[in-house]
Image: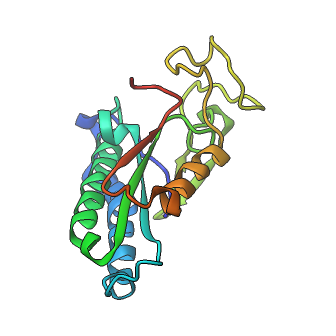
Amino acid sequence: MVTGFTFDKMLHTTPDDTFDIIMKIHVRAPFRLIRQAAPYFRVKPDARENRSIVNVSSTSGLHGNVGQANYAAAKSAVLGLTKTIAKEWGPYGVRANTVAFGLIHTRLTASKEAGVTIEIDGKKVALGVPGAPRPEKVEADEKAYPFIPLRRGGSPDEAAASVLFLASPLASYVSGHTLEVTGGAGI
């Protein structure tokens, strides 16, 4: 499941309702979807079946991020949820993994100055990162991305490919793992 928005605020200024909505979107929604899938996953395994759950986290969930206490907490919770599923449902032949994305060029990481908004509970929420570069193409740019060893952000197709890999039989012995899709950032 991929959804995504943030309500970025410094921890000491984050109201409870802002914290709660991020937890609902990023933790409760995948929890409920996976729970509803239990009758289809928790059955006697067939060696020919490839049954996999891939949850979406973020490097914020691994390392924290300034102004994202709520988002980091939610994305960290997804890691714990996934590892628990891997242990509980592994005996049924179910693999559970997480992808933790770094900078992927999406509306969430676009420049906040672009003015893209969504509506949540009747409130307009600005998407994006203040002052973020938004190139037309995903290409190396040493000045824009000095913190990423590949010197560029990732594309949505590259992000999708990591999910496809974990869901595919190519990852048939990978479970309980978090794959960091970051272009090397964080190493």
Farthest residue, direction front: 47
| Quadrant of res 143 | top right
Name the residue rendered at 23%, 35% in the picture: 12
Name the residue rendered at 27%, 46% in the picture: 73
Give the image location of residue 106, x and y in percent: 62, 44
Compared with 140, 44 (above or below) is below
Q: Quadrant of the C terminus?
A: top left
Please tell me which residue lies in front, 178 or 116: 178
Farthest residue, direction top: 143
Please tell me which residue lies in front, 158 or 110: 158
Q: Is residue 135 left or right of residue 94?
A: right
Please tell me which residue lies in front, 66 or 43: 43
Q: Is residue 40 left or right of residue 85?
A: right
Name the residue rendered at 67%, 48% in the picture: 157
Compared with 173, 145 (above or below) is above
Give the image location of residue 118, x and y in percent: 58, 55
Compared with 80, 186 (above or below) is above
Name the residue rendered at 36%, 74% in the picture: 34
Give the image location of residue 17, x and y in percent: 30, 56
Q: Is residue 150 visible?
A: yes
Please tell me which residue lies in front, 149 or 147: 149
